[in-house]
Each structure stands twice: as structure tokens, then as C-alpha cells.
Amino acid sequence: METHSTVHVYLDWAKGRLDEIDATLASLESSAAKLYGDARAKADRAVAGMRQARDAFGKLMKEQAQAGQETLARSKEALDKQWALFERSYQAYVDAAGKQVDVQRAAFEARAAAQRKAWQEAIDKLHKSATVFAVDRRADLDKAVTQMKTQADAVKVKFDKLNKASGESWGALKSALSESRDALDRAYQAAQEAFKRAS
């Protein structure tokens, strides 16, 4: 059970990241038409870089879906590298878009929605997984579900506040996304540890 649960948590983590990349790309591809000249060329190169990182990320994820426990750490490192490439290309797009706040805002909204979806899917899957354990062994998993719900609610409140505040800088929006992603990563880690203790 432990290996399956650990792999499951890892794949959920990777799927959440891939969903965020896809949501970002969809948002930016639709807004690229608003850019002209050199900005458009830079944005197109950045989108191509993001697509390349997404494709490599997805390929690695599929390859590792069949992998065992022993390869997960190496796989996560490789996916983290692809994530970093995506983020660099994304920042290049934001730089190319310059002061077009609507482009940044739309990308933030798409990424925030993808993260909220990842949080909810993680909560649902963890809750469903917890039901297979006996009551006395399920306490850690129930605690992890409750903590995840609390964190997800806090993230939603923060995203909603930022979304309503029209003057927030891209740095503040980016920081909120990063904080949410880090919190979700910690929640996945806590869930993984809870599965180990319950197994």
C-alpha cells in the first residue's frame, strides 16, 4: 500500500503542475494577439519555450507513472528542472508583455484556478484513500485532509483578495502563486507521510 500511495501522491503533484502549465499556456496563447512587433516575437519565443517545457514535463510524468518507489526522487528532480524552464519562459513572456496588466491578470487567474483545482482534487483523493483504512489507523489521514482543506480555504481567500485588488503588482501575484504551490507541495508531503504511518 505504501508504494502505491506514495506513487499516487507523486502523480497527483505532477498532474497539478501540468494542469497549471496548460492553464497558463491557454491564457497566454489567447492574449498573444494583443502584442505587436518585437514584443510579439519575444512572447512567441517564450510560449514556444513553455510548450517545450510542458511537453518534456508531460513525457517525464508519463514515463514515471509506471516507475517504482526507488525512482520517484530522481523523477521529481527532473520534473522540477522542467518546471524551472517553464517558469523562466513564462517570465520572459511577462517581460515581453510589458505593462499590459490584463495579460498578467488573465494568466494569474488561469494559474490560480488550476491551483484551486489541484487542491480540491488532492483533498478529494486523500479523503477517498483514507476511507480504506481502519478507524484507528485513519486518524493521521483524516488530520491531513483537514489540514489540506484549511490551507486550500486560506489560498482561496488570498487569491480572491488579490483578484479583486486591481493595483497588485505582478510580483505580488507571482508570490501568491508560489506560496500556494509550496503549501500544496508540503500538503502532498504530509499526506505521503500520513500514508506511511497508516500502512
Image (tube, grey):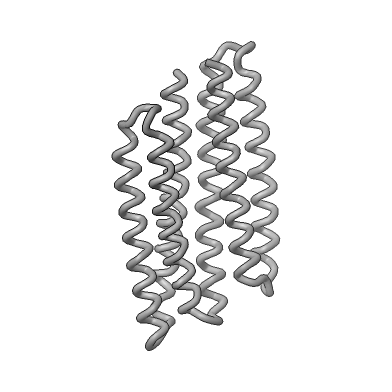
Residue 39: x %, y % from top left: 42, 83
85 left or right, relative to 119: left
User: Taking 144 as reference, is 40 above or below it?
Assistant: below
Q: Quadrant of residue 166?
A: bottom right
32 left or right, relative to 180: left
Q: Quadrant of residue 135?
A: top right
- Number of marks: 0
Residue name at image x 55 percent, y 22 percent: 130
Placement of the N terminus among the 4 image quadrants = top left
Residue name at image x 50 percent, y 52 percent: 114
User: Taking 179 as reference, is 45 above or below it?
Assistant: below
Residue name at image x 46 percent, y 25 percent: 5
Residue name at image x 58 percent, y 57 percent: 177
User: Taking 22 as reference, is 3 above or below it?
Assistant: above
Residue 167: x %, y % from top left: 68, 74
Residue 93: x %, y % from top left: 45, 72
The residue nearer to you, when weighing 109 against 83, is 83
